[in-house]
Image (cartoon, rainbow, N blue to C red):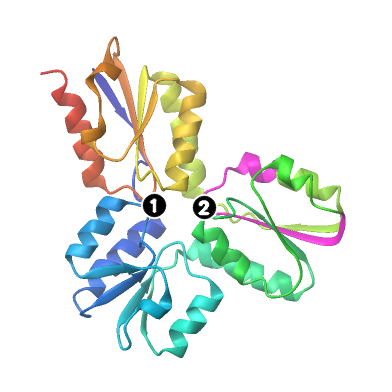
Amino acid sequence: MNILLAKSAGFCFGVKRATNMAFEATKHYRGMYSLGPIIHSPQLVKKLEEEGVKVMQRVEDIPAGAAVIVRSHGARAEELERIRARNLTVVDATCPFVKKAQDHAAKLSLEGYVLVVVGEEEHPEVQGIISYARQGAVFVVADRAQAEAIPPKGKIAIVAQTTQSFENLSQVVEVCLGKSQETRVFNTICDATSVRQDEARRLAEQSDLVLVIGGLNSANTTRLAQICQEIQRRTYHVETGGQIQPEWFQGVETVGVTAGASTPRWIIDEVISSVKRLEK
């Protein structure tokens, strides 16, 4: 079988930065804690646990005097306040692109805009962004249909979860333009997201089967799988090579492989090796 690997498969800048910061921090601090998983890769989180990084979901559960790393998705404003109030040592690995969206939310809220965040409401990145909008109303919309439900407002400002598609953001903007006298739009989508999504489309068009590698809890990986599925029905979202089923590959000549921004290279290599073993 011919295997096509997407050029940008795997770690994006923000995830690579956060991962490097986490492993480097383990050399300087004992008893480190992560406020939520550092990235959405269960396998990498396990490796960090082996290095002494324990995942905690609440600031209150982190022992006094410990070091805490803020994950790439960022933290809610009130969580950071509680961290500082407890005098915990902070290693802030928030992706700079996420930080920019947080800053926009804070500034626009103070300026009297109703904030519209395009994204998944329960995603930790989105929860973090909206926590910085301390004044005024905030609406989280997943798509055009949800944007239609926003009542007319005088001033609307729009930001997006960094892993959203530009097409989805554009559709929401179009709706909001008809609902306000003033609309400000900040394209906070990370370039790495659009690049990976464009590559995924081309890959799906060229392949008889597509493997999308990454955490099942990863929003950007799930979106890649959805994009490929729309073009190539034989698309499978896997976390590891052990999940591959030989029967998937009957009659397949070209296999496309891509991976989410939180997927380590060693997992990508493992999956490719598993596919190659099927031919032996």
Q: In x, y percent, where is residue 88? A: 37, 86
- Residue 274 figure quarter: top left
Give me the C-alpha separation between circle 2 and circle 1.
Answer: 9 Å
Q: Residue 28: within the magenta?
A: no
Q: For the point 30% across and 19% down, which residue is it?
A: 248
Amino acid under label 2? Cys
Residue located beneath label 1 in the image: 12
Amino acid under label 1? Cys
Seen in the picture, residue 200 relative to 82 is either above or below; the reply is: above
Seen in the picture, residue 261 relative to 111 is either above or below; the reply is: above
Q: Residue 159: within the magenta?
A: yes
Magenta-highlighted residues: 152-171
Give the number of the disc on residue 230. none
Between 73 and 207, which is closer to the camera in this rendering?
Answer: 73
Horizontally, residue 190 falls left or right of residue 17, namely right
Give the number of the disc on residue 190. 2
- Residue 22 figure quarter: bottom left
**The C terminus lies in which quarter of the figure?**
top left
Seen in the picture, residue 157 relative to 253 is either above or below; the reply is: below
Horizontally, residue 4 falls left or right of residue 217, namely left
- Residue 14 figure quarter: bottom left
Horizontally, residue 258 falls left or right of residue 128, namely left
- Tag 2 secondary structure: loop
Q: For the point 52% across and 52% down, which residue is it?
A: 190
- Tag 1 secondary structure: loop
Seen in the picture, residue 36 relative to 59 is either above or below; the reply is: above
Residue contact between numbered discs 2 and 1, judged by CB atoms under 8 Å:
yes
